[in-house]
Amino acid sequence: MKNVAIVTGASSGLGKEFTKQIEQKFDYDEIWIFARRESLLLEVENQINEKAGKKIVKSFAVDICGKDGVKRFSDILESEKDFSVGLFVNNAGFGTYGPFEDTPLEKELDMIEINCVTLTGLCGVVLKYLTSNSVIINTASLAAFMPLGNFAVYGASKAYALSFSVALAAELKDKGVKVCALCPGSVSTEFANVASNGARKEVKGGIEPDKVVAHCLKRAFKGKKIAMYRFKWKFTALLGRFVGRYLVARYTYKYKKRPYQYN
């Protein structure tokens, strides 16, 4: 039986970096990567396979958003034979900048679909393929720890991801399955460009994704429930416990505005 790792949102950013480091640091028979953008996904597959000198990465260009996406993901796994999942990196998702009233409602709803519905559904699908010592990593965010003005729906969706991950870790502990929520602050990926709809090309002061991913993998396999690479992120999360939730939301709305543009 093959032991595989699965990474979603693997065409760029953290997902791409997870795929690279999994190949370098672990001995899975195959790494299955999922994303919508086929050309970028194939580029990741080809780069890693060429460097590894063998076909270890297998790509699936598919939209996994929402209930329909979860069904497509499930059908793909059902079509594969004789495998277990040793590591599942549930990384697909995106954010939006700007006040809720200025952001296209359809985009906000799509974000809830991918950040909450898909994240939950994919975990449900992979459960039957896990074994003792399997690991799930769900990508949440530093935004999960407090309500944020100009980031309201994204922060709420990541609060869900964090809460769900910790609860799932408690439920799966007796089966030997580890669950870790990755909660990064600013990372140098295309996140800001997508969240701002092109108004902000790069996030200011972003950490390189290789450091965030390496730290997360180390924490997850040690059985830690949350991974935050920087001390600053940990301090900010801790501070959120002592400052009023409304005050944080009001302050970030007034003084932490991010550039955005919507037609």
Image (spheres, rainbow, N blue to C red):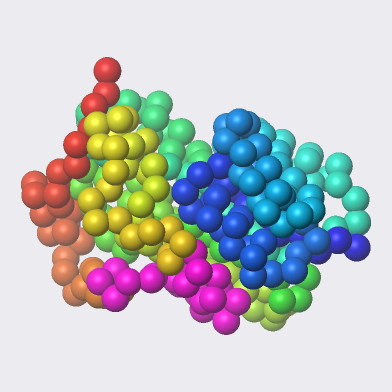
On screen, 115 above or below 162? above
When asked about the image quadrant of residue 258, the answer is top left
Give residue 162's position: percent from left, percent from top. 45, 62
Which range of residues does the magenta coloring cover? 213-233
Residue 103 relative to residue 166: left or right: left
When asked about the image quadrant of residue 141, the answer is bottom left
Nearer to me, 122 or 37: 37
Nearer to me, 218 or 104: 218
Residue at image location 76% in from the left, 54% down from the top: 53
When asked about the image quadrant of residue 193, the answer is top left
Nearer to me, 169 or 257: 257
On screen, 168 above or below 144? below
Give residue 77's position: percent from left, percent from top. 79, 46
Is residue 158 among what the camera can see? yes
Q: Is residue 96 magenta?
A: no
Q: Is residue 229 magenta?
A: yes
Is residue 35 among what the camera can see? no
Give residue 26's position: percent from left, percent from top. 69, 69
Residue at image location 91% in from the left, 56% down from the top: 82
Quadrant for the N terminus, please: bottom right
Nearer to me, 32 or 154: 32
